[in-house]
Image: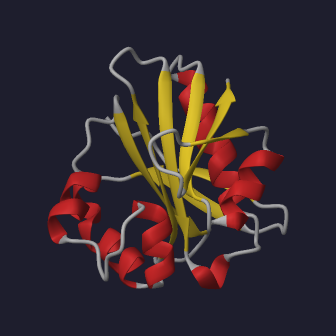
Amino acid sequence: MPQSAQILTTRKGIGIKVRPVAENDEKNMQRFFYGLRPEDLRFRFLTGMKEVSAERIHDMTHVDHQSTETYIAFIEGDSVPVATAMLATDTKREQGEVAISVRADHRAEGIGWELLVFVSRQAAAKGLRVIQSIESRDNHDAIVLEREIGFKAKPDPDDARLVILSKAL
């Protein structure tokens, strides 16, 4: 069952309301992903795509809220999503994978940082021991941010274009 929204404050003093998605958030998610640049979509999904399919958005909004959670973030007082985050756990519920996207017009405001810290806390509260992110080597901003938060980077043994960043919780 989705929990209520939480207000996070970025380093720039911006309040963001973060909550788990609900099944009726498909339009919000469509609006969010429609506003992303092709490069942002490539970094988020690690594949080239022009748009996120209705089926994928359906899957992102119809989650079990246990092994998979999708969060949606809004600037406080606004109804347009500015970021999303996904946390998916392994079957043993020891490790989680995180993926975050922030709209380009809201970068450098600390939203990605706060969302990653928030998702890390959620992962720890679920009892996970490790959280990881898989990034394109070209996604320098995300790699730097994750390292600043304490993630360690290593090459993906199966794909030289990717980096696996992980952090013990």
Q: For the point 53% across and 58% down, which residue is it?
A: 161
Q: Image quadrant for the C terminus?
A: top right
**How many labels, in total?**
0
Spot occupied by residue 97 in the image (x, y as percentages of width and height): 48, 38
Residue at 46 percent across and 63 percent down: it is 44
Q: Where is residue 3 in the image (x, y as percent from the top left)?
A: 43, 39
- The location of residue 48, given as percent across then percent down, is 36, 74
Against 95, is 46 above or below? below
Furthest-left residue in this view = 55
Identify the image quadrant of residue 124. top right
Nearest to the observer: residue 26 or residue 36: 36
Residue closest to the eye, 42 or 22: 42
Q: Can residue 67 be seen?
A: yes
| Residue 162 point in image, percent of width and height | 54, 53
Q: Which residue is drawn at 64% across and 63% down?
A: 16
Which quarter shows the N terminus? top left
Give the colour scheme of this rendering: secondary structure
**Image side of residue 69 versus residue 30, left or right:** right
Q: Is residue 36 visible?
A: no
92 lies left or right of 107: left
Drawn side of residue 155 relative to residue 81, left or right:
right
Q: Is 41 left or right of 153, judged from the image as shown?
A: left
Picture quadrant where residue 132 is located: top right
Which residue shows up at 34% across the image and 30% down it?
A: 67
**Which image quadrant is residue 49 in?**
bottom left
Q: In this view, does 44 lie above or below 106?
A: above
